[in-house]
Amino acid sequence: MATYDVVFSKLGLEDWCSQGETSGPLSMKDLLARTRGESETDTSIWEVPFPSMDALNEACSSFPQSRELTKGLENGFLSIKDSLSIFLDPLTQPLSWFLDGALHVMLATPWWIVIPLLLAVVQLVTKSWKLVAFVGISICALAFIDHYEYAMQTLAIIFVCAFLCVLLGVPIGIAMSRSDTLQRFTIPVLDMLQTLPPFVYLIPLIFLFSVTESKLYGIAIILYAIVPVIRLTNLGIRLVDQDVIEAADAFGMTDRQKLYRVQIPLALPNIMAGVNQTIMMSLAMVVIASLVSAPGLGVLVLRGIRNLELGVGLVAGLGIVILAVILDRVTKMSLARINASQKN
Amino acid sequence: MSDDIKISIKKLYKIFGDDPQTALEAVQGGMGKAELLEKHNHVLGLQDINIDMRAGEITVIMGLSGSGKSTLIRHLNRLIEPTSGSILIDGEDVLAYDEERLRRLRREWMSMVFQKFALLPHRTVLENAALPLWVRGFKEEEFEGEATKWLDRVGLEGQGSQYPHQLSGGMQQRVGIARALTSNSPVMLMDEAFSALDPLIRTDMQDLLLDLQKELHKTIVFITHDLDEALKLADHLVILKDGFVVQQGEPQEILLNPNDPYIVDFISDINRARVLRVRSVMEKTTSVPEHSQGEVAIDDNLESVIAKSGGATDAIYQVMRDGQQAGIISMKDLMKALVPTEAATREVR
């Protein structure tokens, strides 16, 4: 006799309970108890179990066990999976093309074009020769220890994902800044995306997409990294000086003029801070995404863990740190340039 | 100066809250500001405002903070929508305008100068001054000349390529004024335009404004909490308290005949000799006095007459307008006018 028998008999549900009586598989605990020949005795008040699904199931076998919950969730997901795929597959297909294309271009172009090109971009956005020299030395060092290809793969993935994050995130942020209702609905989603452990994203994605497709890790990275750029675009536009907005209204600006000529330019420092965060988070995720076949330095780290190759893992980790420092410095420096041009 | 009414505000009410219409009925039924806040939890912003502003004049709206003066000026270009009432500009009801028509009003008929300048920090001084033009869709080569002209006029020659943060507060507000002038609108709204500036620069800017006004004859609505500034600039002075008009009229008139203890308090501290003018104190007559000590102009202030008299208290002067005698002023009348009204009423008590 189980602790909560009383509850069901009081509610007059004994009939319903007995319908579910089966000689189904027993839990290991029950099995042990049976073999030891222990009979169930009345439990003392100190040992009353919490009325959890399993405890209630013991009293009434029609009551679902908690494993039914996870099972139900899984079945539910699997049943909508196919229809979801029909809709999501074509929608996300371009992501695969972008990623594959970027990886192909990055690796097919000879190093003596890619490295100078990267340095030229660094010079263009930061106007700092010191930083160009630092980036040059770092990349050459990586190439010298034969990590060039891996590093470029990682960079290519980050470029594509961060670009798409900005492309999607900035308009979402702008929309949020204009509607309090939208903000109220979006913020919990953003909070969830930010707090959900990255590994958890991967589980439903693996079910939805084939592991061989690059969009699988692309989506994981974008979902994880898009949050800061949305948040900071929203915040940046909301923080634009109300006096300036009022002046824009008083001189008869249209909403479009106000957005492009006042709000976005004035929110740019915040938006760029969001872009910086987004790039750093895509780098963090690209390593984890190597679990689902994302190429790059993460693969080496994974190899280090799987095969206990300490050296391989450590060197790849160091490479990631170098990439992180490069990306961070370059975006921070361009952010500083924007800030300097619009002090108040 | 013409007598045309440019802007006419009639029975304007503004109530802040969730259900202003119900609250409006209560207010029109005679409920006061404090009672309204307590019973309906609505804030009475403006109450039965009726003001006529003449074309080419400076109308100064004065009141302490919280008196609703900034709210009032924002009704003119509908940055704030009124609860009830009407606003006529050149006889047209602004409240009936649709979005497109309202935008045209803001672009071509009214420009605004702000207390905190509200310049665009990422644009150069020239681009800021040209804002009303590029908002209307003009290209840089088209607006450059116009904007430079007004920048030069407000004393910012050669500063066009600077950014606002490189300029001092006074210079930033000059850009603000240049911006308002570039729009070439007949009406200029100035919301505490000089209140954030230090006193010397403020005086400079007031002189600049009067100077510009002599030349341009715009209809200016000027908000201030500073009585000296109000008296210096106003052709028509409106005194606002707790959202209603306490007194309005010619500033000299208000100074000599305040109709409310609130205004008496207000004007008790000012230097009357500098503010009052001969025309307000003189006795209107064309007969030439026997012992005239000389001539003074009709718009001279009393201070200059005292200086001229050298302290003699029995002198009499002829008051001249355009070479003709308009009246006489005796030092006795002048001295009487210098005694503040408050002191006079205390004697009566």
Image (cartoon, coloured by chain):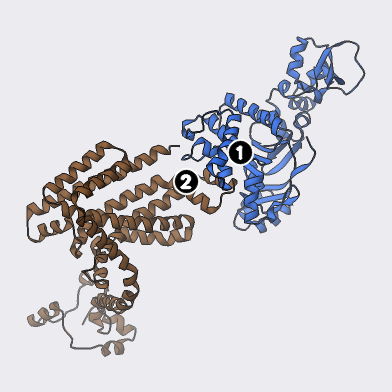
Could you say which disc has been placed on residue A173 in the image?
none
Residue A189, above or below A251:
below
* Pointer 2 local density, CA inside 10 Å: few below 14, some 14–19, many at least 20: some
Do the numbered discs 1 and 2 sit on residues whose CB atoms are within 8 Å?
Answer: no
Q: Which residue is mark 1?
A: B182
Give the farthest residue toward the right: B287
Residue A246 horizontal/vertical position (percent): 56, 46
Q: Residue B338, located in which quarter of the rendered image?
A: top right
Q: Chain of mark 1?
A: B
What amino acid type should be assigned to the residue bearing mark 1?
Answer: Thr
Q: Secondary structure at mark 1?
A: helix
The residue at 44%/57% (across/down) is A176
Report the Cα–Cα distance between label 1 and label 2. 25 Å
Residue B195 shows up from this direction:
no
Residue A23 horizontal/vertical position (percent): 18, 88
The residue at 14%/45% (across/down) is A141
Q: Residue A335, located in which quarter of the rendered image?
A: top left
Colour of chain B as rendered: blue
Q: Quadrant of the C terminus of chain B?
A: top right
The residue at 74%/16% (across/down) is B304
Of tags 1 and 2, which is closer to the observer? 1
Residue A186, above or below A135:
below
Q: Secondary structure at mark 2?
A: loop
What amino acid type should be assigned to the residue bearing mark 2?
Answer: Val
* Pointer 1 local density, CA inside 10 Å: few below 14, some 14–19, many at least 20: many
* Relative horizontal placement of residue A137, taking residue B94 as reference (left or right): left
Residue B21 horizontal/vertical position (percent): 67, 58
* Relative horizontal placement of residue B249, taking residue A38 as reference (left or right): right
* Relative horizontal placement of residue B180, taking residue A201 as reference (left or right): right
Colour of chain A as rendered: brown
Q: Which residue is mark 2?
A: A240
